């Protein structure tokens, strides 16, 4: 019996690999529209939920938290961003298959939103409005700010950071995988370019507290998106995922493998 299952599985894989590739026009058909939009949305939220703002603004964040010298800021960046990112990315390897993609993303986006609220409130306490002035002598706000940054990096590194590309590369069946992954990748880099170009303008318009509050709101929006549209794919074969989309797959009712 196990041998028969293996042979059947190999035949399914061979048929999938030999299948006709969908055209660009077919990607917008009713069958593929949902997974295409899902990949675009995940790539977009991965970039617009604050990671670039934290990294680009790291020196100023740590200066506001009390790290006054360039050496101290570099050390804080190395440990609070580099080391935490590395450690929790390793944690994600064990959690993706144990917990599942969907629950991990939901917890991560909530955690990221909470951490960004901490960062935003800290900047308010530090007096960082549109003028960019700071009120000295507030070590508690600095510690709160540093804690928010570390928590954000930890949640990002073990959830939406690595999970996004795991999901994007498994939700697409053979006929559409190459083109849909390419579109998701273009969305990823396009969003990063936009954030890079307009981050300072947002900073001038909203102030530091406002910008990170905006990122927190985008995390909440990402939570709703994942909860509403992302089905669980843990333990499913590519053929099962293709059948799921053909049946009009929804987030609800597809949580179990």
Image (spheres, helix red, strand yellow):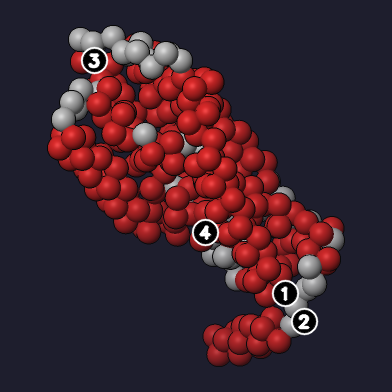
Q: Is residue 132 visible?
A: yes
Q: For mark 1, what is the residue?
A: 175
* 1 versus 254 height, above or below: below
Q: For mark 3, what is the residue?
A: 140
167 horizontally vs 240: left or right: left
224 horizontally vs 2: left or right: right
The residue located at (78%, 68%) in the rendering is: 24
Q: Tell me, yes or no, whether the two marked residues, 2 and 1, touch with CB atoms within 8 Å.
A: yes
Q: For mark 2, what is the residue?
A: 20
> How far apart in space, not on screen, are marks 3 and 4 (Cα)?
37 Å
Q: Tell me, yes or no, whether the two marked residues, 1 and 3, touch with CB atoms within 8 Å.
A: no
- How would you rate the neighbour count of disc 4 (Cα within 10 Å): few for under 14, some for 14-19, many for 20 or more? some
Q: Can residue 240 be seen in this view?
A: no
The residue located at (27%, 47%) in the rendering is: 82
- Please tell me which residue lies in front, 50 or 197: 197
Q: Callout 4: helix, strand or loop? A: helix
Q: Where is residue 83 in the image (x, y as percent from the top left)?
A: 24, 48
Q: Callout 3: helix, strand or loop? A: helix
């Amino acid at each position: 019996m196990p041998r028969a299952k293996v042979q059947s599985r190999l035949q399914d894989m061979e048929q999938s690999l030999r299948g006709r590739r969908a055209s660009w026009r077919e990607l917008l058909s009713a069958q593929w529209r949902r997974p295409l939009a899902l990949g675009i949305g995940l790539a977009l939220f991965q970039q617009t939920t604050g990671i670039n703002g934290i990294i680009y603004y790291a020196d100023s964040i740590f200066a506001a938290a009390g790290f006054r010298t360039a050496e101290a800021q570099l050390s804080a960046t190395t440990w609070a961003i580099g080391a935490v990112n590395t450690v929790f990315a390793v944690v994600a390897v064990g959690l993706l298959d144990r917990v599942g993609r969907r629950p991990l993303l939901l917890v991560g986006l909530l955690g990221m939103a909470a951490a960004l609220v901490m960062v935003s409130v800290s900047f308010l306490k530090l007096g960082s409005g549109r003028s960019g002035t700071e009120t000295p002598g507030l070590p508690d706000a600095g510690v709160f700010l540093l804690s928010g940054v570390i928590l954000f990096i930890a949640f990002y590194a073990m959830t939406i950071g690595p999970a996004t590309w795991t999901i994007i590369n498994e939700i697409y069946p053979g006929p559409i995988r190459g083109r849909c992954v390419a579109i998701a990748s273009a969305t990823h880099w396009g969003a990063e370019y936009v954030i890079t170009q307009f981050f300072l303008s947002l900073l001038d318009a909203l102030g530091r507290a406002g910008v990170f509050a905006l990122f927190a709101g985008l995390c909440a929006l990402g939570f709703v998106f994942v909860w509403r549209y992302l089905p669980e794919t843990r333990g499913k074969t590519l053929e099962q995922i293709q059948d799921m989309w053909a049946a009009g797959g929804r987030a609800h009712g597809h949580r179990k493998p």
